[in-house]
Image (cartoon, helix red, strand yellow):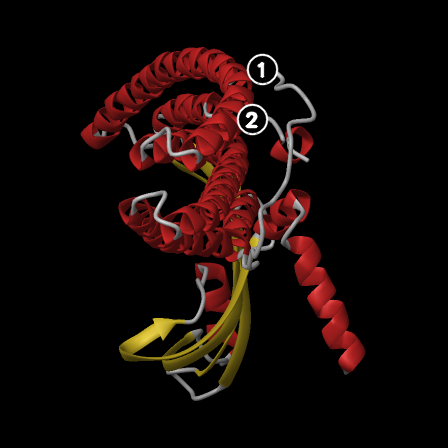
Amino acid sequence: MKKLLILSSAIIAINATDISLLFQAIKKQPESKIDNIAVKEMQLTKKKVTSSLYPKLNIFSSFEHFSSPANIKPLPPTIAAKLAQEGKGYWFSRNITKVGFNISMPLFVKEIFDNAKKLNHIIKVKKYQAKINLLKREALLVTYISKLNYLYSLKNAITQKENSIKTTLKAIKVGVEVGRIPEFKLLRLKDALNSIKVKKSQINMAIDDVKSKIYSLTKIEINSPIKFKVIQNIQKKEFLAIKPLKENKKAQQINLKISKDTLYPKFMLQAKGYRAFAKAYNNGDRLAENFASIGIYMNWNIFDKTNLTQIQKSKLNVLKSNLEIQKTLKNLNAEVKKIYSSLKETNKAIKLTQNSLELKEELLKSAKSAFELNSMTVDEYLRYEDDLANTKANLANLIAIKNSLIANLAFIYGNNLERIFK
């Protein structure tokens, strides 16, 4: 039992630091399973439609009482004459029991075949929607992890600032005790440390909020930053969101054909048979007779104005589908253009901030020395501390923004995020 607990703890620790395992965890969540069930449901719907092409067999039994004798099966005049000569019972009775069967099968019902073709496209729509939903959750995961990493970096920068101020405070405290430095500076540094504690508490709450969102996506608790990087470039291909719209357009085009299919005649094969049991009304003889029939039946709806209205509605749905594709393409092209522009500017800002970070570290060293020598005010010194901490946080935020932009771009193009982020 102890070994199992140790193993479980090890697995959780691995999960908490590996983005690939978090991607895998998303696929095991109920949301992904629900999307897969939706695909299977549509596949069963298609199977139900194609199954209607097979014969249907029913068996039945009945007991009927009539107010006057009814025939248990048709009685030709020649047979009636023969029964009269032989003194046998006629095939008529007030009480008739039957046991039989019905068979029916469509020979030509055009909309059945077109419905099956339409459902092929609807199944593809469901599959694309399942993929879109999965990639959307994965892109959201990258955004959350990037934000989490930023918050941990911000907290780390604040902690470094806190430690730096504490070091300066020790040096200033000696100067205050000997009366060389005014006590105001010591109090100002203590106030700055209190403000840092409040800030860290706020950051911790923000971290808990993001960790909760990651847990809702993966059902895994995160207790540390998740280090990852972009290992492959995004493959530019057809926008993923366009694919289900195109399949839906094809389905609507077939639906228009189905609306027109109602104008064609329908041909059905039907067969039925039964064995009837009764007492002849004329002499009480016990009767047991068989009767069966088979035939081809046509049903042709010559005029139904609702069919014509449905055709017009189907035409509008095709037009609407086409316009939806155009609208989505327009919006996605604009979004991609915006993301590429933002990525370009973000990369520039990252380089500039990295260069600036080295300068600010040197400036802080000089500021600490000047402050300890009492040649700089406390507020001036604290500005250098703030400046360095803010630059570190800003760099982490820019990296988070970059990762989020790449994740959204990968999602738009339908790229596998597991291939891009490791």
The crowding category of the residue bearing disc 2, from other C-alpha atoms within 10 Å (few below 14, some 14 to 19, many at least 20), is many
Image height of 196 relative to 297, above or below: below
Q: Which residue is mark 2?
A: 414
Q: Which residue is painted at 44% across and 75% down in the image?
A: 90
Image height of 129 relative to 406, above or below: below
Question: Which quadrant: the N terminus?
Answer: bottom right
Circles 2 and 1 in contact, beta carbons < 8 Å: yes
Q: For this view, does 218 lie left or right of residue 302? A: right
Under tag 1, what secondary structure? loop
Under tag 2, what secondary structure? loop
Residue 348 x/y as whole percent: 50, 12
- Between 414 and 3, the one lying in front of the other is 3
Residue 254 x/y as whole percent: 44, 24
Among the 4 quarters of the image, the one containing residue 320: top left
- The first of marks 2 and 1 along the sequence is 1
Q: Residue furthest bottom?
A: 284
- Between 101 and 289, the one lying in front of the other is 101
Q: Which residue is mark 1?
A: 237
Q: Which residue is painted at 49% across and 11% down in the image?
A: 344
The crowding category of the residue bearing disc 1, from other C-alpha atoms within 10 Å (few below 14, some 14 to 19, many at least 20), is few
Whether residue 411 is visible: no
Q: Which residue is painted at 43% across and 33% down in the image?
A: 373
Image height of 220 relative to 98, above or below: above
Residue 33 x/y as whole percent: 55, 53
